[in-house]
Image (cartoon, grey):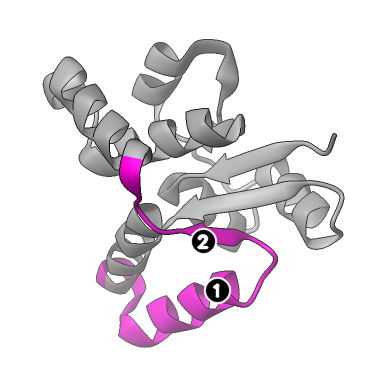
């Protein structure tokens, strides 16, 4: 069975910044060797944060790049939404709602969660790979 990865907004930022540690995961997905996913909630977070930092034009370019890649976009649905809400209740202010969707989707898919958020790693344990924010 192919590996499955779900990306958070921080990892998307690292990818577009040219980070070599995350690039390999995206290359695997683009070659069809692994499956890659992103929650629509995460994608919205990535879009607005990119726009805040680099402007709407750059945000749209990067957003479209993800949309047109082999990374599958996942709309919120049923059990995933309910489980994200329950996780948010349990973690209170430790996780953002977008992070709760990320973790819920990851669990639903049996995917490795790729993040830059140590709080997600702390809660998700071995099913989470946490990357340091750096450009190399």
Element type at mark 2: strand
In this rendered view, identify the residue nearer to me: 29 or 119: 29
Q: Nearer the viewer, residue 81 or 22?
A: 81
Look at 31% across and 80% down and name the residue there: 55
Horizontal placement of 90 versus 68: left or right? left
Within 10 Å of disc 1 (Cα), the crowding (few <14, some 14-19, many 20+) is: some
Residue 9: x and y, percent? Answer: 42, 50
- Residue 1 is drawn in which quadrant? top right
User: Which residue is the site of mark 2?
Assistant: 73
| Drawn side of residue 118 relative to residue 7, left or right | left
The stretch of residues the image draws in magenta is 52-78
Tell me the crowding category of disc 2: few under 14, some 14 to 19, or many 20 or more residues within 10 angstroms, Cα based.
some
Total marks in image:
2
In the picture, the quarter occupied by the C terminus is: top right
- The CA span between labels 1 and 2 is 7 Å
Q: Residue drawn 51% across and 61% down?
A: 73
**Element under disc 1:** helix
Q: Give coordinates of residue 110: x percent, y percent.
A: 61, 29
Give the residue displayed 57% in from the left and 36% down from the top. Answer: 109
- Reading the image, the residue beneath label 1 is 67
52 versus 21 height, above or below: below
């Amino acid at each position: 069975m192919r590996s499955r990865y779900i990306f958070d907004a921080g990892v998307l930022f690292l990818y577009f910044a040219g980070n070599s540690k995350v690039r390999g995961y995206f290359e695997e997905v683009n070659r069809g060797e692994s499956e890659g996913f992103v929650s629509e909630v995460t994608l919205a977070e990535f879009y607005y944060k990119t726009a805040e930092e680099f402007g709407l034009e750059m945000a749209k370019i990067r957003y479209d790049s993800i949309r047109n890649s082999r990374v599958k976009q996942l709309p919120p649905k049923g059990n995933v939404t309910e489980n994200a809400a329950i996780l948010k209740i349990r973690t209170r202010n430790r996780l953002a709602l977008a992070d709760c969707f990320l973790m819920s989707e990851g669990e639903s898919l049996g995917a490795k969660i790729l993040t830059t958020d140590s709080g997600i790693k702390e809660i998700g344990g071995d099913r989470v790979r946490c990357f340091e924010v750096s450009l190399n």
